Amino acid sequence: MKTFVDAFRFMADNPHLLLEKTGEHLELSGAALGIALVLALPLGLWLGHLHRGLFLAAGVSNVGRALPSLVLIAFGLTIFGVGFWNNTAALVVLAIPPILTNAYFAIDTCDRDVVDAARGMGMTGMQVLLRVELPLGLPFVLAGIRVASIFVIATATIAAVAGGGGLGQIIVNQASYGLSGVVAASLCVSVLAFAAAGILTLVRRTASPSHESLT
């Protein structure tokens, strides 16, 4: 209990430090998630629409789960060096599997009767994807983004070992900030992860097919 009390006291005494490191943490996490979305989401949606690429989607998911974060960061050191982009690249690799896999299965498993009816109405392939399949599969797509967000925010804490900054810089530097600083930074990371999960869960519920119009 004393440790948690000291952690809250550390927060009160060092608000500017925690705000600065939280900003760095969000910048790193946001950049990685944004790049992963640009790379994985369109590919997953299109492959699901074509009903092809199951092996790719499953393979990417399995590889992403098997790769240790520290190994990715260490590998990135040889390409990007120490700093922001090395850590961003590693986090992108970790974020892609849940986004790609969920996007693929969200579209691939859509009700075929509804899709066939849309095609019978004369919709093009792109119209079917954007106006029928995507609204139906959006909750599942958002679930993948939620998983990726939580994973990236939590894993970004180890970015400090390769000069990535963020709240991890406090967590891995107990000698300078003490145990109270480590716990305080860890609590901040937890709050960020829970906030991201909560926001995306609300968005997912709002995007439920029962609230969507397919016209």
Image: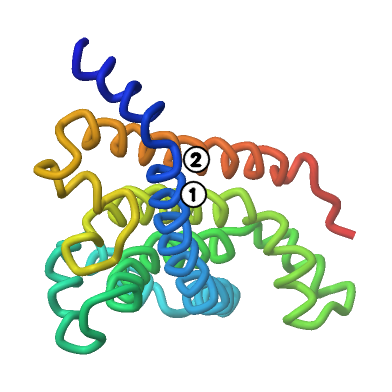
Which secondary structure, mark 1? helix
Query: Sequence-wise, which precedes: disc 2 or disc 1?
Result: 1
For the N terminus, which image quadrant?
A: top left
Query: For residue 173, which numbered disc appears in the image?
Result: none
Q: Residue furthest front?
A: 13
Which secondary structure, mark 2? helix
Q: Residue furthest top?
A: 1
**In front of the other: 4 or 206:** 4
Note whether 215 is above or below 41 in the view shown: above
The residue positioned 84% from the left and 77% from the top of the image is 123
Three-letter residue code for mark 2: Ala
Three-letter residue code for mark 1: Arg
Residue 200 locus on image (x, y percent) = 58, 44
- Residue linked to disc 2: 197
The residue positioned 46% from the left and 45% from the top of the image is 19
For the C terminus, which image quadrant?
A: bottom right
Residue 140 locus on image (x, y percent) = 55, 51
Asked if the residue under mark 1 is in contact with the one under mark 2, i.e. CB atoms within 8 Å, the reply is yes
Note whether 4 is above or below 139 in the view shown: above
Residue 64 locus on image (x, y percent) = 26, 66
Query: For residue 146, which numbered disc appears in the image?
Result: 1
**In front of the other: 193 or 186:** 186
Q: In the picture provided, is 114 more to the left or to the right than 65?
A: right
The residue positioned 29% from the left and 37% from the top of the image is 186
The residue positioned 21% from the left and 44% from the top of the image is 171
CA gap, disc 2 and disc 1: 6 Å
- Structure colour scheme: rainbow
Note whether 6 is above or below 33 in the view shown: above
